[in-house]
Image (tube, rainbow, N blue to C red):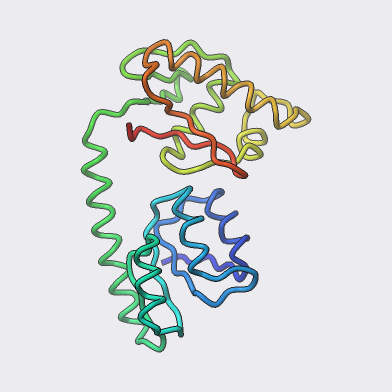
């Protein structure tokens, strides 16, 4: 298991938008923000499994944590082997669910060789910059990605461009998707972060 630690909850939330993690182990006693307040912020941008690991063993904390979206609660102290076992159990369950979802027909399919994206079987007519942005959103499907990341990781957008240019490009992509399906919004803004592409309609 590869672990990345974040002592500050704000840094942790930022890392969550930059990397694809499998699971979060969350303490409740954190600087600047209580761990119970962190959970809903995580849930706004991700469905990643959360195990609360805390010295606070009050039943109220446990109930609130689970109600707000945590998957498990482990009061300290505990044997690290138990933590590893619970991690493996949760990952088996979530990966099984993901495999079932993947069996469903994908709405967005990216072809890196031809630099094209199809939506519901229809190829979208995209500019080079639009392809860069949409392919990144598809890669992070159902997870948020920041405007800054979209800007700086695009091969066809000047690094000196304004962040607002991303909003303009997103608007054009939405318009092209809406020509095929105008009933649903697939690219959603995440306040204070960036955007999220979803296939959960």
Residue 118's quadrant in the figure?
top left
Answer above or below: position of 169 versus 48.
above
- Please name whichever residue, 126 or 10, is drawn nearer the observer in this view of the structure: 10
| Position of residue 178 measured from the top left corner of the image (x, y, whole percent) | 43, 15
In the displayed structure, does residue 110 sit left or right of residue 100?
Answer: right
Give x and y (percent) for residue 114. Answer: 45, 17
User: Nearest the camera: 91 or 59?
Assistant: 59
Q: Is residue 174 left or right of residue 7?
A: left
Residue occupying the point 57% across, 61% down: 12
Rendered residue at 30%/80% (across/down): 82
In which quadrant of the rendered view does residue 51 lie? bottom left
166 vs 119: above or below: below
Against 74, is 50 above or below? above
* Direction bottom: furthest residue: 77
Write the residue at 46% across / 61% down: 39
The count of marks equals: 0
Task: Judge left or right: residue 50 versus residue 97.
Answer: right
Where, quadrant-wise, is the N terminus in this rendering? bottom left
Q: Toward the viewer: 7 or 66?
A: 66
| Outermost residue toward the right in this view | 160
Is 142 located above or below residue 44 in the figure? Answer: above
Where residue 64 sits: x, y (%)?
A: 39, 69
Which quadrant does the C terminus fall into?
top left
- Picture residue at 35% right of the left edge, 86% below the top: 79
Q: Percent from the top left, x then y, of residue 149?
A: 62, 39
């Amino acid at each position: 298991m590869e672990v990345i630690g974040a002592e500050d909850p704000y840094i942790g939330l930022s890392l969550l938008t930059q990397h694809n993690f499998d699971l979060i182990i969350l303490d409740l006693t954190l600087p600047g923000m209580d761990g119970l307040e962190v959970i809903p912020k995580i849930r706004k941008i991700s469905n990643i499994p959360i195990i609360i690991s805390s010295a606070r063993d009050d039943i109220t904390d446990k109930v609130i944590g689970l109600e707000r979206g945590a998957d498990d609660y482990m009061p300290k102290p505990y044997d690290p082997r138990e933590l590893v076992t619970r991690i493996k159990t949760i990952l088996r369950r979530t990966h099984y669910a993901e495999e079932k979802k993947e069996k469903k027909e994908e709405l967005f399919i990216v072809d890196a060789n031809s630099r094209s994206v199809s939506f519901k079987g229809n190829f979208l007519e995209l500019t080079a910059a639009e392809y860069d942005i949409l392919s990144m959103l598809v890669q992070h499907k159902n997870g948020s990605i920041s405007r800054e990341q979209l800007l700086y990781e695009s091969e066809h957008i000047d690094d000196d461009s304004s962040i607002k240019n991303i909003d303009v490009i997103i608007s054009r992509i939405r318009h092209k998707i809406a020509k095929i399906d105008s009933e649903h919004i697939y690219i959603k803004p995440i306040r204070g972060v960036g955007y999220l592409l979803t296939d959960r309609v």
